[in-house]
Image (cartoon, rainbow, N blue to C red):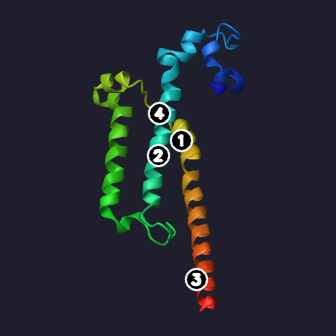
Amino acid sequence: YMSQGIALPQLASWSQCGQFWEPSNGATCAELFQGEGRSLPQTLSLTTLVCMEMLKALSAVSVDSSLLRVGPQSNPWLLLGVSGPFLLHLFVLYSSSFGLSAIGDSLGMVPLTKADWLTVAAWSLPILLVDEVLKAIGRSLAVKEKCKAATAK
């Protein structure tokens, strides 16, 4: 929406479009927030959430070891459990390429461009960094706890 000239305060009050503010790009409120107008933002949001959850699942292969030390390939069932839903999501996204556009249309989803995928990656990949930082903090606390227990004996 921001690329269409809609500011964050306007987006936060989207339901008041037409009453308290008007779009500056010449579009109507209905064109922006209903039907086709919301398909791309809706698709981007859902795809970002799907990617975040799949990355979080891959990161959860070990509770305290880094993803770089214990990779997701160590659990083939996890890889299957992540790739299945992701492939299903891709199928729905690009169902129009298979001549089944009604599937994506019924869910209000549109195919994403390379630029859209970069946006999805920019918003979903940081979850890996957050997970790795939390694992490092957990490892540090565990080491401190072991040191305390050793000195107490």
- Disc 3 and disc 2 in contact, CB within 8 angstroms: no
- Disc 2 and disc 1 in contact, CB within 8 angstroms: yes
Q: What residue type is labelled 4?
A: Leu
Task: State whether residue 80 is above or below residue 43.
Answer: below
- Disc 4 and disc 1 in contact, CB within 8 angstroms: yes
Label 4 or label 2, whichever comes before in sequence order: 2
Q: Which residue corresponds to mark 4?
A: 112
Measure how far apart labels 2 and 1 are at the Cα level.
8 Å
Measure how far apart labels 3 and 2 are at the Cα level.
36 Å
Label 3 or label 1, whichever comes before in sequence order: 1
Taking the view exactly as shown, the residue that stands out farthest to the bottom is 153
Task: State whether residue 56 is above or below residue 152.
Answer: above
- x, y percentage for residue 35? 47, 15
Q: Is mark 1 on a helix, strand or loop?
A: helix
Q: Which amino acid does label 2 sit on?
A: Cys
Task: State whether residue 105 is above or below residue 129.
Answer: above
Q: Which residue corresponds to mark 3?
A: 146
Q: Is mark 2 on a helix, strand or loop?
A: helix
Label 4 or label 1, whichever comes before in sequence order: 4
Q: Quadrant of the N terminus?
A: top right
Q: How crowded is mark 3: few (under 14 residues within 10 Å), some or many (20 or more)?
A: few
Q: Which residue corresponds to mark 2?
A: 51
Closer to the eye: label 3 or 4: 3
Q: Which residue corresponds to mark 1?
A: 120
Which residue appears at 67% of the width and 7% of the height?
Answer: 19
Q: In this view, does 144 lie to the left or right of 121?
A: right
Q: How crowded is mark 2: few (under 14 residues within 10 Å), some or many (20 or more)?
A: many
- x, y percentage for residue 32? 57, 16
Closer to the eye: label 2 or 1: 2
Measure how far apart labels 3 and 1 are at the Cα level.
40 Å
Q: Is residue 100 left or right of residue 147?
A: left
Q: Which amino acid does label 3 sit on?
A: Lys
